[in-house]
Image (cartoon, rainbow, N blue to C red):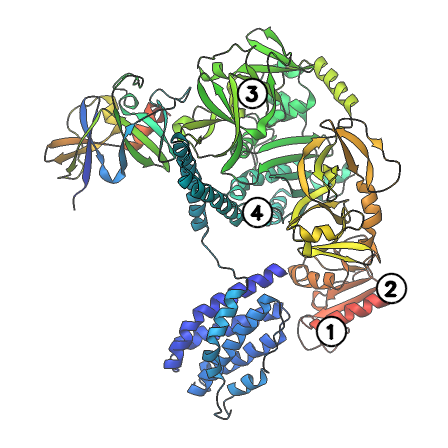
Amino acid sequence: MEELLADFVAETREMLEAVGGELVAWEAEPETGERLDAIFRFVHTVKGNCGFFDFPRLEKLSHAAEDALADCRNGDRQPDQQLVSAVLAVIDRISDMIDAIEAGEDFHAADDEALIDALSPDAAPSASPAPASSSDAATKGAKAASGPRSIRLPVNLLDRVMSGVSDMVLARNDLARRLRENGDQPTIDGPFERLSAILADVRDAITRMRMQRIETLFTSFPRLARDLSNELGKQVMIDVEGGEVELDREMIEMIRDPMTHIIRNAIDHGIETPSERLSKGKREIGLLKISARQAGNRITIAIEDDGKGIDGERVLAKAIEKGLIDSEDGARMAPAERRRLIFTPGLSTAEEVSEISGRGVGMDVVRANVERVGGSIELDSTIGSGTRILLRLPLTLSIIPALTVECGGQRFALPRASVEELVSGKRDHVEFAQVGDSLLATLRGRRVACLSLADILGVEARKSVEDATLVLLRLPGGDLFAISVDQILDHEELVVKPIAPAVMGTGLYAGTTLLDDGSPVLLLDVAGLARDADISVDTRTPNEADEDKAATDADAPREPVLLFIGLDGRRRAIRMNVVSRIESLDPSAIDISGGGAQVVIGEHILPLAGLGEGIPADTADSAKLGLFRIEDGQSEMAYAFSEIIDTAAIEQDIIPSESVGEIEGLTLIGGEATELVDSHWLFASHARVARVGEAPVCRLPLDDPWSRQLLRPLVEAAGYRVIGQDDDEDAAIALAAVESGGETPRAGRVIWLRSSPEAAVDGPESIYRYDRAGLIAALGDARSGGGR
Amino acid sequence: MNQLLLIVTIAEREVGICAAEVNSVIALDGVTPVPRAPDYIPGLTALRSRALTVIDCARSMELADPVDLSGPGERNAVVIEYDEHLYALLVDGVSDVMEARTQAAPIPGRLAPGWQRCGNGMIETDAGPVLVLDVGAVVGGPLAVAA
């Protein structure tokens, strides 16, 4: 709602600006029809928009102006100087009101009646209110400038600024190098430091400017799903979650196609026809769940369906049939590896090529596209019960954390997201075994293929593989392999630029960038390296694979956790899977009352924990406060922290704490004792605030857009939980349109809405659907009635 | 206003590059090799904090063996932007800027295949006719046509 309001304000402002010129021209010659039209359109639009929002004064004013102008347009009235002044006064008042709305204040200034009266044809030629506008102008300008304002910009302008800033970073690096070469120069170094700091700030701000809610991408999917399922005679319900996650605009564009493709696949190949589903004991309607969440500087998008899953056997059979792998290799593959074959180029499992998929664009292209933006793709599927595809993406495209390595006297960069571990061949007692042409390395009982980067690149290594440093890399499918390099150089944040197509054609590089010393360096494409060396899967034998699996099972629980420092300064960990989002907030958003703390995030008020033993005084001092938003599937709450350390996994047993409370127990993470936050206890003790007085249920015809978009927020604001027409749950009340003519919805009580202001004579008792006051009153009545 | 041509020497021939396409002419300094890249790409170089892909023009037109950059002497390169990428076209020499006297016309007579592929026709200048280089074909290399 807030966003709609901001749009309304922005749009009205824009129109006000445009109409400003027209007004002056109209004042000079009131008879010109064109000017009149433009002004009429403005007040008309304002009036229309007011219907959505609750601005009775604004609506009344614009309505009055519209009426007067309509008379002029119809020729019933001649515009004269007096009318012009009156309209000007109204428009000035609208502009003032918009300012007040934006600032969130009530608008108290003089009554509107005088303005409205001045519009009528027989108004006394009084000292018109128009002069007020000019005398106000200066103060008005000042006021507008003080409030937060927004402007609209063409996106390509933003892109240009962004690329300019990236270039500036590179130029700065270049300058830094030259300064270093010339030794200490105090007079220059100081300002240069300052310049660097400012540049870092600007870069940060620009990056944020380009962020867009992923909603903009998600909103097209329900329609896509609907069209596709109709075409295929399937029924699919789409559930979108986490639309508020923000992502680089360019990144959103880059993943649009891959995601569309995955959704098509899910509906075409995954979800069965209704009859098939019924015979398998599933609900007729297939569920496609799309969710996004942010953790640190990465975004995870999950696309889940409850269809038939991916049959590894069939994928394998197809791959063998197409000669992509030989049957012996295939027989040794673990089920997960077989399923992962769908990412192999040249494979499509569709029984027959259908309209929707199988157009030669396969999952291999999807994978390649996701990898190109520095992301990875994971697949998880169970036959008969569904498939889940996870996309992991960096927040921005152009700046990639990288590891620089040396090989054959030359430097290369590896995306840090793919780097699993660095191992020194000698020191860490890695065993090497030569099998045929390939070299295998055994690291902590795990055998992985080991490639020499020098061999792949055809350059001469300075060290033998055994002496070299190994970089353990994770392929997007989850497989590991190692490459040997002469030396590890540094961790750097690189501004990566695309590379010329002819170089891209080698398939080994993902981009290029300049280092601080001004020399170009190539960013290696990890998947490309593996492809080049023909490793697509782990080289473990099935036996080993089983053993490894047993070993990891014994190691359990290896739950992923987030390590952080609490407000009380203690090292803590929280289970990753309950954290839905990480926010940073102003401490003023926290409200402590009656023994409980709450925090306002966007439009939600969440119970807040983690403040410690009632020492909120601390929090008021800190500039910003970190919050985890945690979720148990039904309710949501927040947990405050001061700093995130890292992500980790629980490797050791948890020593339960003595008393029941916020801390579940102690465990060792990274060699340090860490308190594990007890999420269960958190919800049990805090989330009840949100659950007090279970919200009454209201049934709405959600298939109707009007009900969904306009009515639903109103009903929810009145404290109801909304369910759809066909939900099995019992509802306390239901809202239904008189005109729908449908049967009475199942509910304790039904409120009928009519679309015309006048009640039909023979219909049931009903409320006009824009009668906001009446509707709210009725909802309130029903609620107090329902509480009995 | 007539079109201007930058006259460069490639494989001992003088050819013209449309001056409008040329960003600058630089002395090539410090080329980072790109392992496994096609042999007409000796590597990357940096210009004002941007990376350029160096193109060995003579090799791209299959008129000479790959250039050996380790040898002594200064090498000139013409910086152009093509398809949103920056390239440094390695040439034997840059001699002059000439005004075009005519529109590009087909070349009479036979040409080596490389010239055939990368030529954009012939233009008369005050110093006689020159072949105009199609930079897209040059940066695409011999493979681009095969594909």
Kindly indicate the quadrant of the structure image that contains residue A438: top right
Query: Could you tell me which chain the residue with mark 3 belongs to?
Result: A
Front one among A591 and A132:
A591
Inter-mark Cα distance, 3 to 1: 68 Å
> Dot 2 corresponds to which residue?
A787
Task: Identify which residue, A518 or B115, lies in the foreground.
Answer: A518
Residues under numbered marks 2 and 3 in contact, where contact means CB atoms less than 8 Å apart: no
Instruction: Give the side of residue A388 with respect to residue A210, left or right.
Output: right
- Which chain is disc 1 placed on? A
Q: CA distance from mark 4 to mark 2?
A: 41 Å
Depth check: give the residue in front, A272 or A678.
A678
Identify residue type, mark 4.
Leu
Crowd around label 3: few <14 · some 14–19 · many ≥20 (10 Å)? few
Q: Which SS class for mark 2? A: loop
Say which element carries label 1.
helix
- Cα gap from disc 3 to disc 4, whole angstroms: 35 Å
Query: Vertical placement of A741 versus A40: above or below?
Result: above
Q: Position of residue A412 (x, y in %)?
A: 47, 24
- Of marks 4 and 2, which one's residue comes earlier in the chain? 4
Which callout, 2 or 3, points to the residue nearer the camera?
Answer: 2
Cα separation between marks 4 and 1: 37 Å
Q: Quadrant of residue A530?
A: top right
Tag 3: amino acid? Lys
Relative to A396, is B136 on the left or the right?
left
Q: Which residue is mark 4?
A: A217
Specify the amino acid type for callout 2: Gly
